[in-house]
Image (tube, helix red, strand yellow):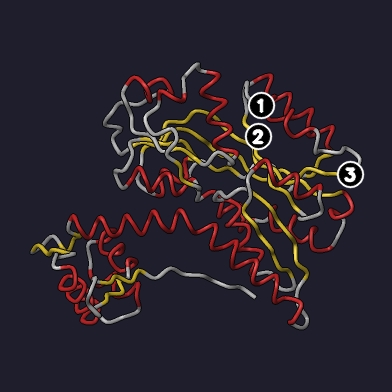
């Protein structure tokens, strides 16, 4: 049972019964392709119907949403662009939360359904590789995934408390590695747990295309008076960013917008792309998704942790097969800054800690 929750943009005029339901996906297709035919295909509507809708929306607002130029196709007006970027930010911001709510409902109704599949409970921070894995698992007969997006710090706590079967953990390479290891050690019982390699990913600064402010370092965020948008304080990425600031002796209070927050990598990227900020910190895949430039600062390794007994179960063995399979590796290869490195390889906790500490020493 899969449940999808979608947002609807319904505009009202005060004191008037008139409303407009704007399909922002249609406008976004116009923005990306410059073609109304592509927007019509996206919405599975006729060209004439889509053009009629856009005219209705323009009449409602009293401002045109698109403009056409002979030989140059169709493009959004400044107002149309503003609507589309508002929608992009909303989707990036609320998407993971809506997925969590949908999963909660699916879990609640599962006991009332007959012959349900084996369900694997996964708690992991939101990124790009985890949803790709979920797509493949959702297509696997007899295997269900209860995926909840939680912070990096809370996923191991969930595993220890029996609230999940798989816990996602990401650790930076380099001099910050040991801090992250020390924070994890108390939750990694070497007799009880096993660690599974997943992917590596690149993190750094996201800036506007062409990097107009010439941002190349954390110090530039202050020196060039950059408008910044940060991650929420509970996220692992925010913790990592704060550690980087301390390492490079940059005062967070001196950064314009350090307390301005969004809740996902995609959300901060959309914030920058819509010109509400000049820079943010996150994964390369999010920057590329929104057409931003990316200044790499470090590499992170992403792992899963599970109980030793659970590792031997048939559902978990099937997940390992999918992780090691070509289809998943091909999907990860399409994500900028992600690499499927030794994916699906299982380690004991002592061997895992030895390997990550060694990487910290040589990075």
Asked which quadrant contains residue 316, the reply is bottom right
Sequence-wise, the earlier of marks 3 and 1 is 1
Q: Position of residue 202 (x, y in %)?
A: 53, 36
Q: Residue at x 63, y 24 (%)?
A: 176
Q: Is mark 1 on a helix, strand or loop?
A: helix
**The C terminus, quarter of image:** top right
Up/down of 62 relative to 18, above or below: above
User: What number is the disc on residue 123?
Assistant: none
Q: Position of residue 281 (x, y in %)?
A: 46, 35
How many tags in the picture? 3
Contact between labelled residues 2 and 1, with CB atoms less than 8 Å apart: yes
Direction from residue 265 to residue 147 in the image, left or right: right
Outermost front residue: 15
**The N terminus, quarter of image:** bottom right
Label 2, residues with CA under 10 Å away: few <14, some 14-19, many ≥20: many
Sequence-wise, the earlier of marks 2 and 3 is 2
Q: Is mark 3 on a helix, strand or loop?
A: loop
Label 3, residues with CA under 10 Å away: few <14, some 14-19, many ≥20: few
User: What number is the disc on residue 177?
Assistant: 1
Label 1 to label 2, Cα distance in Å?
Answer: 6 Å
Direction from residue 288 to residue 72 in the image, left or right: left
- Of the pair 114 and 17, the residue shown nearer to us: 17
Q: Residue at x 75, y 52 (%)?
A: 166
Sequence-wise, the earlier of marks 1 and 2 is 2
Up/down of 141 relative to 269, above or below: below
Q: Position of residue 254 (x, y in %)?
A: 40, 23
Q: Where is residue 28 in the image (x, y as percent from the top left)?
A: 31, 62
**Residue tagged by mark 2?**
171
User: What number is the disc on residue 192?
Assistant: 3
Direction from residue 59 to residue 178 in the image, left or right: right
Q: Which residue is drawn at 24% across and 71% down?
A: 14
Outermost left residue: 70
């Amino acid at each position: 049972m899969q449940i999808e929750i979608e947002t609807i943009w319904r505009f009202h005029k005060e004191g008037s019964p008139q409303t407009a339901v704007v399909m922002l996906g249609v406008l976004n297709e116009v923005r990306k392709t410059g073609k109304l035919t592509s927007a019509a295909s996206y919405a599975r509507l006729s060209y004439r119907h889509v053009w009629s809708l856009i005219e209705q929306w323009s009449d409602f607002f009293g401002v045109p949403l698109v403009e056409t130029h002979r030989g140059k196709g169709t493009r959004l007006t400044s107002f149309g662009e503003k609507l589309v970027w508002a929608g992009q930010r909303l989707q990036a911001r609320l998407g993971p939360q809506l997925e969590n709510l949908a999963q909660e409902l699916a879990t609640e109704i599962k006991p009332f359904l007959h012959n349900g599949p084996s369900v694997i409970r996964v708690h992991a921070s939101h990124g790009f590789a985890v949803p790709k894995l979920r797509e493949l698992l959702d297509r696997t007969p007899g295997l269900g995934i209860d995926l909840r997006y939680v912070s990096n710090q809370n996923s191991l706590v969930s595993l220890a408390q029996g609230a999940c079967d798989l816990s996602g953990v990401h650790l930076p390479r380099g001099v910050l590695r040991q801090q992250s290891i020390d924070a994890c050690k108390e939750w990694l019982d070497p007799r009880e747990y096993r660690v599974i390699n997943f992917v590596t990913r690149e993190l750094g600064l996201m800036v506007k295309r062409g990097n107009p402010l010439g941002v190349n370092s954390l110090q530039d965020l202050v020196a060039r008076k950059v408008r910044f948008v940060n991650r929420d304080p509970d996220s692992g990425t925010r913790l990592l960013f704060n550690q980087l600031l301390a390492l490079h002796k940059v005062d967070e209070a001196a950064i314009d917008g350090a307390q301005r927050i969004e809740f996902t990598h995609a959300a901060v990227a959309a914030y920058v792309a819509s010109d509400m900020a000049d820079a943010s910190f996150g994964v390369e895949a999010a920057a590329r998704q929104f057409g931003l430039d990316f200044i790499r600062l470090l590499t992170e390794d992403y792992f899963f942790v599970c109980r030793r007994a659970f590792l031997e179960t048939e559902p978990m063995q099937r997940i390992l097969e999918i992780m090691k399979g070509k289809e998943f590796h091909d999907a990860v290869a399409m994500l900028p800054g992600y690499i499927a490195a030794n994916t699906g390889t299982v380690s004991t906790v002592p061997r895992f800690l030895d390997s990550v500490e060694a990487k910290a020493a040589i990075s």
